[in-house]
Amino acid sequence: MKRVYITTVVTCIIILAALMTCLKLMNLKGTKDHLTIGFIYDNDESTPYTYNFSLAKDALEKEYGDKIDILSCSNVLDDEMEEPLRELAESGCDIIFFNGYSEMVMQLAPDYPDTQFCQTSYMDMNGVAVPENYHTFKGEAYQGRYVSGIAAGMKINQLIEEGTINADEALVGFVAAFPTSEVISGYTAFILGVRSIVPEARMEVSYTNTWSSYAQEKAAANKLISDGCTVISQHTDTIAPAIACEEAAGTKPVYFVGYNQSMSEVAPETSLVTSRICWEPYILSAVDAVMTNKKIEKNVAGRVHGSDISAGFEKGWVEMIDLNLPVAAPGTKQAMNSAIDSFKRGNRDFVFRGDYTGVKHDDPSVTIDLHNGYIENENTSYPLFDYILSDIITIV
């Protein structure tokens, strides 16, 4: 009996040890119980860009509840972000998201190998060697800009048909921060969307040389309105251009197309539609990857370029919000949906294509012919089109 008893005990110990080993292996490869997540914002949620980015934080809280803790820092300038970044990493963040434009994130990532650093792309990452725990991502914004242009073109066409303006007065304005390829790509896609409806349309672009200045953005928008622009859009970070359109609406036919955040509340009589990059699909999937010990680039649905990922309408990374039906021209929704469906089917080469010649914004000796088309975000999530379309776009 003793021999049977001893054999049984030994067998139980062996089975228990094997079970504990399996549980340890499962814990290494399986789901983590809890994550600490960091967010660093270049501004605060009062600005459209940061507000839009912060929606992903809200989505995480809804998805994971008390399984996560979120630490965040706001109003962090690019050249001042080392301290908050180190503080978040040293506070135990498993993953940190940053919406600014700084190489410092990539430089500091090796100091914290147990933390994943995910930054909205700010440069061409094609072929760039980066730390294993550093990642970049961005929605293909040109798709939303093009569809926004369709909405603007439909409104301009309505004004022409009603006799409010003549075809040769089809002028749109764009309040732009800086002449970066990201900004140029966006406003070029916008005017090409307009011209898909109104071939005579032209554009004036006014640079503010700052991402966020209410006064400068409003002054730029007012100047474009006084020049006769009937639709204004922007790639800057305040609501000022929308306010300028709403204030001018009583005296001039002018409408507004938004970016990142709906402007219907501040410009109910003039707002047409807004396009936004949706950060939620990437951020939710990246957190899931860390939670389940998977490689981020294998867990996120998008076009993978090394450690960099992009996507458009087809993966929900870009969307149109708040189409203002009482203000928009009849048929706008159908025209927009037709283009969106084309993007979802994988067609991307129809935007930057046509009888156009572009001149490189900082080197007039370099040109591009768009007869054969140009595909944006083909090898990197950061937009690279930085040519000014001759006779179509004027910098004022």
Image (cartoon, helix red, strand yellow):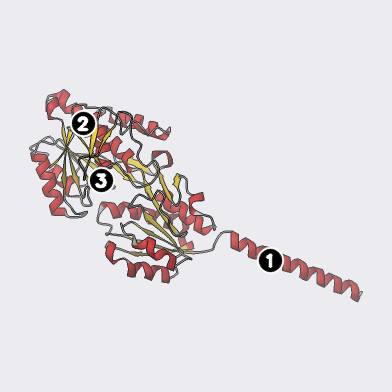
User: Does the image show residue 76?
Assistant: no
Q: What's the residue type where badge 3 is placed?
A: Val
Q: Which residue is mark 1?
A: 21
Q: Which mark is residue 235?
A: none
Q: Earlier in the sequence, mark 1 or mark 3?
A: 1
Residue at figure coordinates x 44%, y 65% from the top left: 110
Cβ atoms at labels 2 and 3 below 8 Å apart: no
Q: Earlier in the sequence, mark 2 or mark 3?
A: 2
Residue found at the far bottom of this picture? 2
Residue 294, image x and y in percent? 53, 55
Residue 161, image x and y in percent? 17, 23
Residue at figure coordinates x 28%, y 37% from the top left: 189
Residue found at the far front of this picture? 365
Taking 12 as reference, is 68 left or right? left
Q: What's the residue type where badge 1 is placed?
A: Thr
Q: Which residue is mark 2?
A: 155
As measured in the structure, the alpha-carbon distance from the residue carrying label 2 to the one carrying label 3 is 23 Å
Q: Earlier in the sequence, mark 2 or mark 1?
A: 1
Residue 25, image x and y in percent? 64, 63
Of marks 2 and 3, the one in the foreground? 3
Q: What's the residue type where badge 2 is placed?
A: Lys
Callout count: 3
Helix, strand or loop status at disc 1: helix
Taking 67 as reference, is 48 left or right? left
Q: Which residue is mark 3?
A: 183
As measured in the structure, the alpha-carbon distance from the residue carrying label 1 to the one carrying label 3 is 54 Å
- In the image, residue 130 above or below residue 173: below
- In the image, residue 281 above or below residue 40: above
